[in-house]
Image (cartoon, coloured by chain):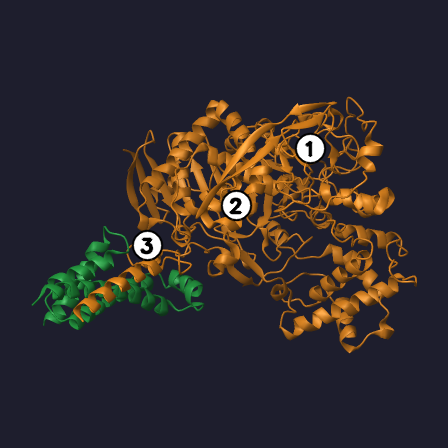
Amino acid sequence: MKFIISTLLSGMLYFSLGLFLPWWSAFVAGLLIGLFMQQSLAGSFFAVLAGVFITTICYTYFTSISNDHILAKRIAMMILKEESPLGLIAISAAISSLSAASAALSGRSLILLFKK
Amino acid sequence: MKYMVFVFSILFNIALYVVLGTTQILPLPLGSFLNMQEGIWQNAEPVDADFNGNLKLKGISGPVDVYLDERMVPHVFAAQENDAYFVQGYLHAKHRLWQMEFQTHAAAGRISEIVGEKAITFDRNQRRIGMVYAAENALAAMEKDPQTKAAMDAYTNGVNAYIKTLHTSDLPVEYKLLGYKPENWTNFKSALFIKQMTNTLAGYDKDFEYTNALKLLGEENFRILYGQLPDSLYPVIPAGTVYNQPLAQLVPPITADSLYFNRKDSIAFTEDFKPDPANGSNNWAVAGTRTKSGKPILANDPHLGLTLPSIWYEIQLHTPNYNAYGVSFPGLPGVVIGFNDSIAFGFTNAGRDVKDYYEIRFKDEKREQYFFNGEWVKADRRIEKIKIKNAVTLSDTVPYTVFGPTTYDHSFKHALSGNKAYALKWVAHDSSNILKMWLQLNRAHNVQDYVEAISHFNAPGQNMIFASKSGDIALQQQATFPLRWKDQGLFVMPGYDSSYLWNGYIPFEENPHSFNPVEGFLSSANQRAADSTYPYFIPGTYEVYRPITINRKLASMYNVTVDDMKALQNDNYNVFAEFARPILLNYVDRTVLDADEKRFVSLVESWNLQNNPNETAVVCFTNWWDSLQAVVFRDELNPGQQPIVMPEKFVLLEALRRDTAFRFIDDIHTPEKENLNALVTKALKNASLQLKSLESEDRMKWAKFKNTTVYHLLKNNAMPFARSGLMNGGGSGIINATQHDHGPSWRMVVELTTPTVAYGVYPGGQSGNPGSKYYDYFISTWTDGEYFKLFIMDETDIKSGKFKWKLSINPA
């Protein structure tokens, strides 16, 4: 249950912070979940990873669909050297989720340092 | 263990931040670039986006309504003229901000600020040819005129009103890609844009190459290879026109023989970043006596580098004083090529040489004083500060002489000795208010208004075509062109005294012009303006063949319709090949050809002379002729380190049509005496190797061979933003002048009936955003030679709702 709540919360937090913070809001969202959601290190890491990953996938996929993938194809060609909108979506999600999850790991491990 | 996990995770976070947030490791800051709320995903414009809106903006005096049609063309209805320019600035910025800033950064030599050290030479070159100096002079003249200043101020405020609304997430993709942010627009940037266009169209010269060629070949051979008057010249102003004699006959200085025509040394470098000599255009106007409707038709297609975002932005500006429609330059207020309710206007490039280099002798390497009129004169010094991304600012000191900036000295071209330099005198440096011309043309009613408007224009030299609903057609080649003695400025001139300075300018009234000619049509296609009876020396780089086809066709056309004009703009007939093919076919020695070579000859023989997209014969012909040109000239024109330029294409063709024993036929490096048969056959054999290779790559079709590409402004660095492999015909010397990355950048046909009927298309789209469907919306239509009917909106259309979106802008 905690895992699901953490997953949902991290996704929502990442989205909300991103409305007014730059790209590194992923680190902030992950750190906050790590600090305040009591669970194991692995639980914290994977819950945030999943939450931010799914949020990014959903957001970018629907954005790209409504754009007929015009831009995603061009940017994917630039970065991946092939017209793969899904590849670009996956990379975007991987970057944000890994950033958030590694920050969650830091936050949780900091709490665990002080836990007896 | 707990500590290890903590430390490891912290280190991992730092590493991620560095890798994703900076360009230290990866070429792009992927963290922000691919962020869903800040990065490129915000530029993915929904294909069904709603562009309706209501805005309140500071800087306008009354409400302005913008109606957008289904092609995203804005129709701006404003009660005040300057409000229309304000909104034009706003719309230009909304759709083309990055392009506007990038082009003006390029003009100002500021690209190093964006891309770093690799652009330093380019930036220094821009500063050293005096682009910033020229823009400052132009701005001073433009701001002196209250009407122009008010228009520029309104436009600038409109651009900045848009910039003010931008958040990081809204920035155009290119800013995110290159990692910088826009700065405020200024009137100075508009002046820089004008100078960028001036450099594009009047920045080509061959002074250094001609100087070397003269020394290498001697005067007689030089004149044969680099003559200015082709036999097949079809001048802009019909041959036989009687010209006034000039007030004074200009003669060369007495030192010209020794210092100018017979200089001792050659020059071991040439100019960098020369504009494309193919920058040109077609325009023509057909009088009502030749049209089906009885009203004039005007057509124009300017040939420029094909770029995305496009150089053009289509717009209608409707105010109580005028109603102008056409294409505008993002960066300037007003319509640049188009029409209003009374007249239509268009331009082609004059191709005249208005740029001369003078050799300067400085006292020493400090370059503080130069020798002029028998004494050492102090040079003005302009210190150009060039900011460089991730490096310290570079200071480049450019001495200014009586001629202009010393573009080349030992600090820039290491081949030069310490005290020798080359200063540039260029019409573009003179102050003038050329924007006034467009502001006046937009509201012109008749030929008198047209003449008054174009009198404000000093550079780049243009053939300005005009037609009116009252039935007039007119054409004038306009700019301030230097008065030269014969051959002045062909070569680098001595800059040691005032005798080599220009002798003023050709008077406005003496510029070649024509009004309602008996032929019933006027045209220009970058050819020499006038025949040899024109009493002024007018060197330049001129087209020979497009004008022949245009004039031939127009002369044979009656009951002309808009469709005829569209077809003519897309005409693929190769008149050069019409003249050149008999030489190839008559002189090739067929007895020594292999099967492939015979096949190529046969293709050329049966060709219909159309440069159509799927044609293979044109590939054979082009390679064969280019190969012939190489085998004829490479022995004489292969001087090693000294830059030299190949003769224009017409030179060899006309020489061979006159005399097949042309003196350059013989290869000076072989003991035997070659004849034309030997060279034509050798050329075919050389070309055959290339042709077989093309066949194996499936590139024998003309469109595949030339691979027409509309590049993004970042060229090869942003190929996914480009459109390549476009299947269209045409080519150099063809009315449809589409080459690899160059060609008709806007095709327009206007029939001056009531109401006006107009068609147009450009190879791009209204939006500069590669994430918008409107980015390259027009390219397929353009490639197919089709047009859009231009929607000239009026109040009735507003009432009946003939628009797709409406943007209401009100004062804040």
Rendered image quadrant of residue B785: bottom right
* Residue A97: percent from left, percent from top: 25, 65
Which callout, 1 or 3, points at the residue further toward the start of the chain? Answer: 3
**Which residue carries the number 1 mark?**
B513
Q: How many marks?
A: 3
> For the point 79% across and 74% down, which residue is it?
B598
Pointer 2 and pointer 3 on the same chain = yes
Q: Are marks 2 and 1 on the same chain?
A: yes
Q: Which mark is residue B131?
A: none
The x, y position of residue A65, in whole percent, is 32, 64
Q: To which residue does mark 3 refer?
A: B49
Q: Viewed as shown, does residue A95 lie left or right of B792?
A: left
User: Residue B755: image x %, image y %?
Assistant: 49, 40
Q: Earlier in the sequence, mark 2 or mark 3?
A: 3
- In the displayed structure image, the side of residue B525 where residue B216 appears, left or right: right
Q: Which residue type does callout 1 highlight? A: His
Q: Secondary structure at mark 1?
A: strand
Tell me, what hue is chain B? Answer: orange
**Circle 2 sits on which residue?**
B758
Mark 3 crowd level (few <14, some 14–19, many ≥20, 10 Å Cα): few
